[in-house]
Amino acid sequence: MGNLWSETEQIWEGVFSGIASVLIFIMGIAFLKMDRSRIKWRYKLAVAFEKSHSGSLKDGDEAESQGGKWALFMLPFVTVLREGLEAVVFVGGVSAAFIFKARY
């Protein structure tokens, strides 16, 4: 039996290209719907702005706003951490395929 990956490489490329095309299509539809919902978001933001500046914040609302601040920190942090770990795993995998010898 030969190298299974090399025999089916074209099939895998086609499958992954199809999956990527479907994901891009779905994201495009979502972006089009976001444009239509701009008025709804403006209304929600206006209500939230009035609520937060009316001085009648409840304990739950304040905790919710603190959670949003943490989310703005944690999302980029976790994303960068994941990319860094992915790079380490990739470099480790590539380096495991070679035997390194010191030259004197």
Image (tube, rainbow, N blue to C red):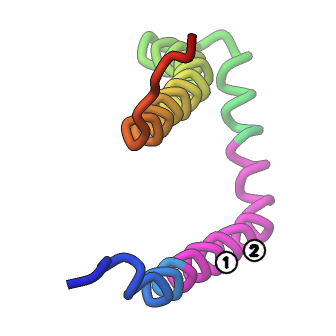
Q: Which residue is drawn at 54% across and 27% down?
A: 84
Residues 79 and 2: in front is 2
User: Secondary structure under badge 1?
Assistant: helix
Q: Considering only vertical position in the picture, is 2 above or below 44?
A: below
User: The magenta stretch spans which residues?
Assistant: 17-44
Residue on which disc 1 sits: 29
Whether label 2 touches label 1, CB < 8 Å: yes
* Image spot of residue 19 (x, y percent): 50, 79
Q: Can residue 65 be seen in this view?
A: no
Residue sitting at x 46%, y 41%: 94
Q: Residue furthest front?
A: 104
Amino acid carrying label 2: it is: Leu
Q: Position of residue 65 (x, y in %)?
A: 56, 18
Q: Quadrant of residue 54?
A: top right
Q: Residue 32: which numbered mark, if any?
A: 2
Separation (CA) of disc 2 from disc 1: 5 Å
Question: Residue 89 in the image: x percent, y percent?
Answer: 42, 34
Magenta stretch, overall SS: helix
In the rendered image, residue 20 lying in the magenta stretch gets the answer yes
Residue 4, disc: none
**Amino acid at pointer 1:** Ile
Question: Badge 1: few (under 14), some or many (20 or more) residues near its Cα, within 10 Å?
Answer: few
Q: Which residue is drawn at 50% across and 77% down?
A: 16
